[in-house]
């Protein structure tokens, strides 16, 4: 079916209305009318080809929530009228060790990403959530607990799981000192989860104006990273640091804060390589790691955890016509703390 969307046609072009085709549902497919879609910094990186792998036209969006309008005849988890969500993946090989372990994001054949991934069905590329609807196999579709605010739930599908998963993996909890670097979409969820898990949470920001918000969101302490004296006070003291920064920055300044055998994990994905001073890793045997989103089962676990603990994102709702402006604001760190597109606005698009 013909479906309205917003797409980037080249790395330099603004996102603009574009018509895409969605397949008729296969037996295990769920058709979802998209109600809200979050704006992830990864959307900006990819729309502008900052990771050098974008195929155009590119329809971004992988924080999708909506309502099921149709299901294939073998679908068991959903029926018409249910709420449903889709995150960063829509399929994977399902047979490799990572897939069998429920860690589809590490599929050795690369998971099929929600956009800018090779579409198994159309033979073209997948198109994301800046669109009216999406058709996804039920195995990659999430249930949304009824009591969560729907628009504020959308960012959980990427920003939420991307921070929840590493905090769980590295066993962040009571008695642990945890740093979160960058108070954007990912960072603000990292603060909320680390606090909910019972850790002592320190937020690092380049924006002094975000201090009060960081404390309100759950940080016990806030450090303005440009202040060297404040940074020094925390030398060698962290069990774990989660780096959520979207741009190039001095990673050594944060490695230096990790204690013996502690870990700094990158989830931020800047365009250019980060330089690491070898002795910053060698001396107190520090670990430097990365982490990608989370598997489908863990994403469902995270949504259920959020419902239980009343956690959602802090959002600023926009219309799709404002998405280019929202990208410009993201680049300035000017978002509190996730833009979410009200997809009803797409109906007004030319
Ligand atoms: P975002 O909302 O734009 O937040 C990024 C934050 O980084 C900003 O709010 C700012 O926080 C800080 N920052 C920006 N420029 C900086 C600079 N030059 N130096 C130091 N700090 C800077 O972005 P996001 O959506 O949270 O995404 C963050 C990164 O994670 C992106 O690179 C994205 O692609 C990546 N990502 C990775 C995964 C994964 O699976 N690993 C999943 C989703 C996203 P302050 O103002 O507080 O300093
Ligand atoms: Zn994302
Ligand atoms: Zn696999």
Image (spheres, grey):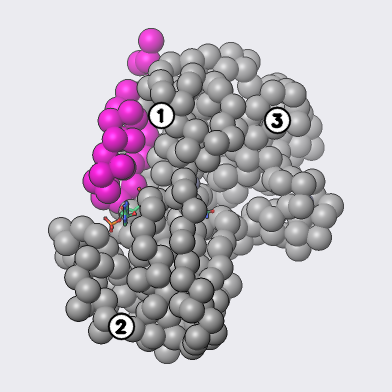
- Give the labeled residue for mark 2: 234
The residues tagged by marks 1 and 3 sit, at their Cα atoms, a distance apart of 23 Å
The residue shown at (24%, 60%) is 206
Image quadrant holding the C terminus, namely top left
Camera-side residue: 240 or 84? 240
Would you say residue 325 sits in the magenta stretch? Answer: yes
Q: Range of the magenta residues?
A: 321-350
Q: In this view, does 281 lie above or below 79?
A: below
Q: In this view, does 211 lie above or below 313?
A: below
- Give the labeled residue for mark 1: 343
Q: Which of marks 1 and 3 is in front?
A: 3
The residue shown at (63%, 40%) is 113
Which quadrant would residue 181 be assigned to in this image? Answer: bottom left
- Few, some or many residues within 10 Å of mark 3 (<14, 14–19, 20+): some
The residues tagged by marks 1 and 2 sit, at their Cα atoms, a distance apart of 43 Å
Point out the tag, 1 or 3, that comes first from the N-terminus: 3
Q: Residue 198 placed where, x, y %? A: 41, 81
Residue 178 appears in the picture as rendered: no
Camera-side residue: 273 or 301? 273
Point out the tag, 1 or 2, that comes first from the N-terminus: 2
- Give the labeled residue for mark 3: 119
């Amino acid at each position: 079916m013909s479906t309205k969307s917003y797409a980037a046609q080249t790395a330099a072009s603004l996102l603009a209305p574009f018509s895409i085709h969605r397949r008729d549902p296969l037996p295990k497919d769920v058709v979802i009318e998209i109600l809200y879609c979050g704006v992830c910094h990864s959307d900006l990186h990819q729309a502008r080809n900052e990771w050098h792998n974008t195929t155009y036209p590119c329809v971004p969006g992988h924080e999708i929530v909506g309502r099921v309008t149709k299901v294939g005849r073998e679908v068991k988890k959903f029926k018409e009228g249910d709420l449903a969500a889709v995150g960063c993946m829509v399929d994977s090989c399902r047979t490799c060790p990572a897939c069998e372990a429920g860690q589809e994001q590490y599929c050795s054949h690369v998971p099929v990403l929600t956009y800018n991934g090779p579409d198994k069905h159309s033979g073209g590329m997948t198109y994301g959530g800046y669109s009216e609807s999406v058709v996804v196999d039920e195995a990659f579709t999430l249930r949304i607990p009824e009591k969560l605010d729907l628009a504020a739930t959308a960012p959980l599908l990427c920003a939420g799981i991307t921070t929840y998963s590493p905090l769980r993996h590295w066993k962040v909890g009571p008695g642990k000192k945890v740093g979160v670097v960058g108070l954007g979409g990912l960072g603000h969820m990292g603060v909320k989860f680390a606090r909910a898990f019972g850790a002592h949470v320190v937020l690092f920001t380049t924006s002094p104006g975000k201090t009060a918000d960081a404390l309100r969101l759950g940080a016990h302490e806030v450090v303005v990273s440009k202040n060297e004296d404040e940074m020094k006070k925390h030398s060698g003291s962290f069990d774990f640091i989660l780096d959520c920064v979207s741009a190039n920055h001095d990673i050594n300044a944060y490695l230096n804060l990790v204690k013996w055998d502690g870990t700094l994990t990158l989830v931020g994905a800047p365009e250019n390589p980060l330089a690491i001073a070898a002795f910053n890793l060698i001396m107190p045997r520090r670990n430097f790691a990365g982490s990608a989103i989370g598997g489908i089962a863990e994403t469902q676990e995270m949504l259920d955890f959020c419902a239980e603990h009343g956690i959602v994102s802090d959002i600023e709702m926009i219309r799709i016509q404002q998405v280019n402006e929202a990208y410009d604001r993201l680049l300035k760190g000017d978002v509190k703390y996730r833009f979410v597109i009200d997809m009803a606005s797409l109906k007004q698009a030319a």
